[in-house]
Amino acid sequence: MLAGCHRPEHHDYTAGPGPAAGQKPSAEQAAAATKAVLTGFVRLAPGATLPEYGPDAMERKVTTAGDPVTFPQICTPPKKLDRVPVRLTPDGKLIGVMIAVSDFKRVKSRGPRTYEVTIKDCRLTPMLVVAMKGDSLSIKNEVVYPLMPELGAVTFSETLMPGQPKVVPLNEAGVKPVLCGFTAPCGRSDIVVLNHPLYAVTGEDGIFTIDDFPPDETVKVDAWHPLFNSAELQLRVERGQTKNVELTLLPVGQTAASTPPKP
């Protein structure tokens, strides 16, 4: 990932109170003492504005000629906000960006998971999904209209009727969009597939948490989204510790406001 603007701030605090004198630690306390946890949030770079996708990036183009595909009348007409995949909380934290760990030596294994994207009001939600290679993506149409969502550069092969799910295996690492075309557009959802499970996405409160952070080693942490430059930092979280960090993201093609020198 590309290096970007960042302003990391570290706040260390313990995972919780230990057992009273003469008492054995509870199962929760024992588990907390063996884990490292990373939490935090991401801010928009000073002077930057939230980026948006162009109209052409919101629809799979099936042909180069003919009339453009239009929204079904049962759906709300497209809005400019539909093309803004990352939002801000009232206190300025970014919603919907990825946090990923790299340069680690050890990682906890886990079994495959299935992530869901749903088409509501002719719009895919969520607009960003991060998964691990070997996971699956379930795409479900909740619109009373046949839609044809596809992941990446594949040919159209299946129309999703209302209530019908489509499960796609995520067998390759990389970044691919889910888009619709031919019958009607359905917005956009970016699918990021990593080779490991050390990742998170900032939620509606702008906060992210990685519970099984690699303990006792210095690793790299990246904040990223397809419309943003990467922001990274190196840090170490000791076993039994929770660390809080802040990163700052700059949209691709934008320039952060300079900080005036202190008198």
Image (cartoon, rainbow, N blue to C red):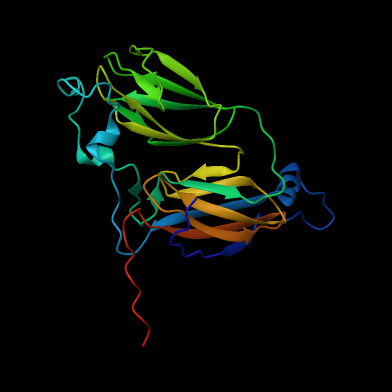
Q: In this view, does 71 lie above or below 188?
A: above
The answer to which image quadrant residue 86 occupies is top left
Quadrant assignment for the C terminus: bottom left
- Depth check, front residue: 122 or 33: 122
x and y percentages locating residue 202 in the rendered image: 46, 46
Residue at the extreme bottom: 263
Q: Which residue is drawn at 33% across and 11% down?
A: 161
Q: Is residue 170 above or below residue 47?
A: above
Q: Residue at x 70, y 56 (%)?
A: 217
Q: Residue at x 29, y 18 (%)?
A: 143
x and y percentages locating residue 50 in the rendered image: 30, 51
x and y percentages locating residue 181 in the rendered image: 28, 22
Q: In this view, does 147 lie to the left or right of 116?
A: left
Q: Is residue 27 left or right of residue 205?
A: right
- Depth check, front residue: 91 or 234: 234
x and y percentages locating residue 4 in the rendered image: 44, 59
- Depth check, front residue: 168 or 127: 168
Residue at the extreme right: 22
Q: How many marks?
A: 0
- Depth check, front residue: 71 or 150: 150
